[in-house]
């Protein structure tokens, strides 16, 4: 019978992975940081994005039409890259293959994103999008929490507030659902514990996840933070799905 390592052991392994040199996760050169400078220059170019949902946006407009018609619950969003090669490989390693050492490199990628550092510097808390108890038990760690903890170590960043936002139940996989179906699937799934409301009321919050596809998960999480009294919510993700599914 296979026994999954305890969360504290995985967290220790994550810290060790982050401290040691390794091969570049993209080009494979050794010894390198998890993502080398050449690969950052080649694959992490910046592009104009909607300031509300981080969707790639041409023509110089500050917001996409979908956000103008139906603004999300968060006030702004930042994404470092589009979801696709080679970042999808690193994100898969982080999310599904117990490679939490990639979190530091992806947090540094986020630090290069225009506006992300200023959003962090002006916030009081970093809040990772939580997993359900079932999913956390299955996976052993929360990739969003690893990213949030790595971001909290950057200069002038606020602390990571794990446990401030909870996921009350597990939900079916959303990969084949439309945005409206995802929103219905996630209705009421996030909450701030009553004893933690005082720590968020009137404050600026950075909400962190690894990937934004339709924005439904971040929207539902932001609604719970808003209900608890958060004054301003900025979503930060590593990758944004480039298509525009907000129908």
Image (cartoon, rainbow, N blue to C red):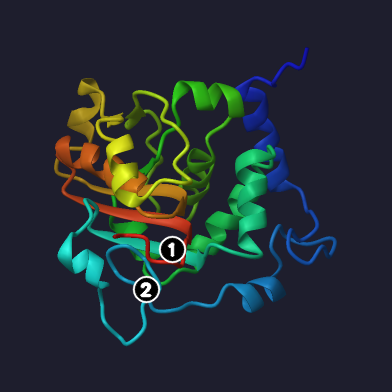
Q: Quadrant of residue 192?
A: top left
Residue for badge 1: 79
Q: Residue at x 38, y 66 (%)?
A: 244
Where in the figure is residue 9, as x and y percent of width and height? 67, 25
- Residue furthest to the top in view is 1
Q: Residue at x 59, y 64 (%)?
A: 84
**Which numbered dot is residue 12?**
none
Where in the figure is residue 191, as x and y percent of width and height? 26, 29
Residue for badge 2: 49
Q: Secondary structure at mark 2?
A: loop
Left or right relative to 213: residue 221? left
Where in the figure is residue 113, as x and y percent of width and height? 45, 68
Q: Quadrant of residue 122?
A: bottom left
Can residue 157 be seen here? The reply is: yes
Circles 1 and 2: CB distance less than 8 Å? Answer: yes
Q: Residue at x 37, y 60 (%)?
A: 245
Compared with residue 145, is residue 35 higher up or lower down, i.e. above or below? below
Q: Residue at x 52, y 35 (%)?
A: 142
Left or right relative to 155: residue 71? left
**The one of 169 and 182 positioned closer to us in this rendering:** 182
């Amino acid at each position: 019978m296979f026994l999954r390592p305890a969360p504290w052991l995985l967290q220790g392994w994550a810290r060790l992975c982050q401290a040691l040199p390794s091969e570049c996760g993209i080009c494979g050169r050794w010894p390198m940081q998890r993502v080398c400078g050449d690969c950052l220059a080649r694959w992490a170019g910046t592009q104009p994005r909607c300031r509300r949902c981080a969707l790639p946006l041409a023509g110089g407009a500050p917001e996409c039409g979908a956000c103008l018609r139906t603004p999300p619950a968060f006030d702004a969003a930042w994404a470092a890259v589009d979801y696709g090669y080679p970042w999808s490989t690193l994100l898969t390693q982080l999310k599904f293959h117990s490679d939490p050492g990639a979190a530091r490199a992806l947090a540094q990628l986020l630090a290069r994103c225009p506006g992300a550092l200023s959003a962090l510097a002006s916030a009081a808390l970093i809040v990772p999008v939580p997993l359900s108890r079932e999913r956390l038990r299955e996976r052993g760690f929360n990739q969003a929490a690893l990213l949030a903890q790595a971001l909290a170590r950057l200069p002038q960043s606020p602390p990571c507030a794990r446990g401030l936002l909870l996921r009350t139940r597990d939900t079916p996989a959303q990969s084949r659902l439309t945005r409206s179906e995802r929103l219905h699937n996630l209705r009421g799934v996030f909450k701030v514990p009553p004893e933690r409301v005082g720590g968020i009321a009137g404050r600026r919050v950075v909400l962190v996840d690894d990937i934004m596809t339709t924005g439904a998960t971040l929207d539902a999480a932001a609604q719970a933070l808003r209900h608890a009294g958060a004054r301003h919510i900025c979503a930060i993700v590593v990758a944004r799905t480039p298509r525009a599914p907000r129908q």
